[in-house]
Amino acid sequence: SIYFSGCRGIGDEGCEALAEALKSNYALTEISFAKCQTIGLRGCQALAAALKRNAALLQIDLSGTMIGKTGCVALADALKTNMTLTSMSLEWNYVSDTGCAALAEALRHNTTLTEINVARTGIGVGGCVALAEALKSNTTLAKLNLHGVNIGVQGCEALAGALKSNTTLTDMKLGGAICDLTVLGCRALAEALSTNKTLLNLDLGRTQVGVEGCHVLAMALGTNTALSSIDLNCWEVDISSCAALAEALKHNKALSNMHLGCTKVGVEGCKLLAKALKTNTTLLNLHLGCTKIGAEGCRALAEALAQNTALTSIDLNCMNQIAQTQPLDRS
């Protein structure tokens, strides 16, 4: 492995020299150029050409560089013939829908890539739709990071549609303030979760969706048998949403991690979740940081823990009210 992360001195010339070496190197398996902002299109094109011949490299990180959408197109072309690379990160590059469409086309041919990170890359609805179409036939990709991408309702519906037939994707990140998921997107995801048997981790944190969206997903969790982790951090979760989530926890036998940090769970919502924890036997980690559950909510959780035999971790970060809670007699 070689890490050049944050090294500004490499530039396109240095990248071209490294790319030339990669054409004949059979030992290097991982290389990172993360935050090397002096690497641009020329350097990226050289790396793409090297990837067509290299048969050893497994991971490449170009996040935070300056390769642009044209560089992304060059990398996508390399992925059509490269048969060893398993992970590629392009986060914080301007990939746009043009670059994303090229990546999607490459995924129809590539049979080794298992993880791709295109978070915060300026991709829009068109790019998401193209990726979703590729997921219907791709049989190797396991992790897809679209955090901070404006997927829109149409993009979300397309991705949800792909989940109905895709059998390899296990991790998907769609969160972020510009995600524009809406209730319609939540309904599409919920419908997909009712049949999908392979997705394990779904990150929807920091997505601006109302209470109704949370209700819809909670209902899906009640029947889903695969998802082990869901992130609803910073969602508009209120007491009615907590009631729906608590009801789901009573029936769900797969979920092990739930992130509700920075939501409006409050005291009453916490009591509902605590009640569900008394009978739930699978949840291992519950994140409730910055949810204003108060001393009374903490007390309810403590009482639930006296009966719960599964939970191993509770995040109560930023809970000054805990100091007011009286110790629980567990004798």
Image (cartoon, rainbow, N blue to C red):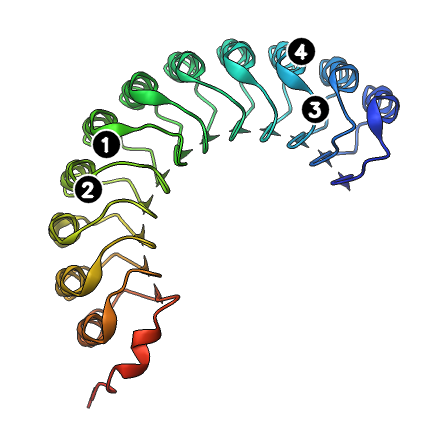
Query: In the image, which is nearer the foreground, mark 2 or mark 3?
Result: 3
Pick the front one: 320 or 20:
320
Amino acid found under the numbered disc labelled 4: Ala
**Residue to which mark 1 is pinned:** 193
Q: Residue at x 67, y 30 (%)?
A: 60
Amino acid found under the numbered disc labelled 1: Leu
Query: In the image, which is nearer the foreground, mark 4 or mark 1?
Result: 4
Total numbered labels placed on residues in the image: 4
**Considering only order in the chain, which callout, 3 or 2, is on the residue closer to the N terminus?**
3
Picture coordinates of residue 8 (x, y %)?
A: 81, 36
**Residue to which mark 3 is pinned:** 66
Mark 4: secondary structure: helix
Which corner quadrant of the image does residue 27 belong to?
Answer: top right
| C-alpha separation, residue under disc 1 versus residue under disc 2 | 8 Å
Label 4 neighbourhood size at 10 Å, few (<14), some (14-19), many (20+)?
many
Q: Are marks 2 and 3 in contact (CB under 8 Å)?
A: no
Please state, as top left, top right, bottom left or bottom right, where the N terminus lies in the image.
Answer: top right
**Residue to which mark 4 is pinned:** 74
**Residue to which mark 2 is pinned:** 221
Picture coordinates of residue 266 (x, y %)?
A: 21, 61
Q: Are marks 1 and 2 in contact (CB under 8 Å)?
A: yes
| C-alpha separation, residue under disc 2 versus residue under disc 3 | 40 Å
Amino acid found under the numbered disc labelled 2: Leu
Label 1 neighbourhood size at 10 Å, few (<14), some (14-19), many (20+)?
many
Pick the front one: 170 or 213:
213
In this picture, is 207 found above or below 11? below
Mark 3: secondary structure: loop
